[in-house]
Image (tube, rainbow, N blue to C red):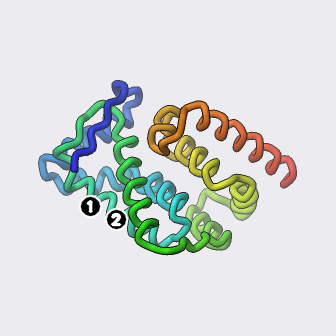
């Protein structure tokens, strides 16, 4: 299967670095896959988790994504949006996993707290605030905010990735920001 994104030229040095990693992977460099993994694993995991709401499934999709990258790197068309390509693979694998199981298990708030506790820079107060902010959003809003904030994708790229009109993504993003601001005010 060939994943070829037709998007604008690289706008950031990060996209160029990711493109370089994928080119090295295509030539068989295992270290390049490790580099790509280190640079993108949090974004890939976060996106998979936002779709699947199950830490074990998200971890499986994380690994499957990089296996797919290893296999498909030779067919990748470099247009400077390697992260969008990676997120497309992640989305497709996540939806495949959802189709394979009858019901999703909700992600418990304590699981988010446990994951955030693993990051030394995130304080207990930060975790509590983030929990309140995330709970104030609907599933689709959470995905849009996560994709934009975590991966740095532009709104049009988020729209393409989620199969939504750009106007819908912009509207939901703005609504989500307002909800988060309101939740922030209530938490303080």
Q: Nearer the viewer, residue 138 or 181?
A: 138
Q: Residue at x 62, y 51 (%)?
A: 142
Query: Residue 127, percent across and down?
Result: 69, 61
**Disc 2 to disc 1, how far (Cα)?**
6 Å
Query: Residue 115, percent across and down?
Result: 57, 67
Q: Which residue is drawn at 39% across and 42% down?
A: 83
Query: Residue 164, percent across and down?
Result: 53, 40
Q: Do the residues labelled 2 and 1 touch (CB within 8 Å)?
A: yes
The residue labelled by disc 2 is 63
Is 108 on the left-hand or right-hand side of 166?
A: right
Dot 2 alpha-carbon crowd within 10 angstroms: few under 14, some 14 to 19, many 20 or more = some
Q: How many labels does the image show?
A: 2
**Which of the 4 image quadrants contains residue 90?**
bottom left
Position above or below: 55 against 4: below
Q: Nearer the viewer, residue 25 or 108?
A: 108
Query: Residue 53, percent across and down?
Result: 55, 66
The residue labelled by disc 1 is 67
Q: Residue at x 20, y 55 (%)?
A: 71
Q: Which of 176 and 127 is in front in this view?
A: 176
SS at badge 2: helix
Q: Which residue is drawn at 48% across and 42% down?
A: 163
Position above or below: 105 against 120: below
SS at badge 1: helix
Is 9 on the left-hand or right-hand side of 141?
A: left
**Which of the 4 image quadrants contains residue 80?**
top left
Find residue 26 and name its label: none
Dot 1 alpha-carbon crowd within 10 angstroms: few under 14, some 14 to 19, many 20 or more = few
Position above or below: 111 against 155: below
């Amino acid at each position: 299967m060939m994943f070829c994104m037709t998007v604008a030229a690289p706008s950031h040095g990060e996209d160029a670095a990711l493109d370089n990693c994928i080119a090295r992977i295509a030539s068989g460099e295992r270290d390049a896959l490790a580099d790509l993994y280190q640079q993108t694993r949090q974004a890939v995991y976060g996106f998979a988790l936002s779709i699947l709401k199950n830490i074990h499934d998200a971890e499986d999709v994380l690994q499957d994504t990089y296996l797919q990258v290893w296999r498909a790197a030779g067919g990748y068309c470099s247009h400077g949006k390697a992260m969008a390509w990676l997120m497309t693979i992640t989305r497709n694998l996540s939806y495949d996993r959802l189709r394979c199981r009858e019901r999703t298990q909700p992600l418990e708030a304590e699981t988010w707290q446990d994951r955030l506790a693993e990051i030394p820079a995130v304080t207990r107060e930060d975790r509590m605030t983030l929990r309140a902010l995330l709970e104030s959003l609907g599933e689709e809003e959470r995905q849009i905010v996560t994709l934009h904030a975590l991966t740095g994708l532009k709104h049009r790229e988020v729209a393409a990735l989620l199969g939504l009109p750009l106007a819908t993504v912009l509207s939901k993003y703005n609504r989500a920001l307002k909800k988060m601001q309101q939740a922030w005010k209530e938490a303080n």
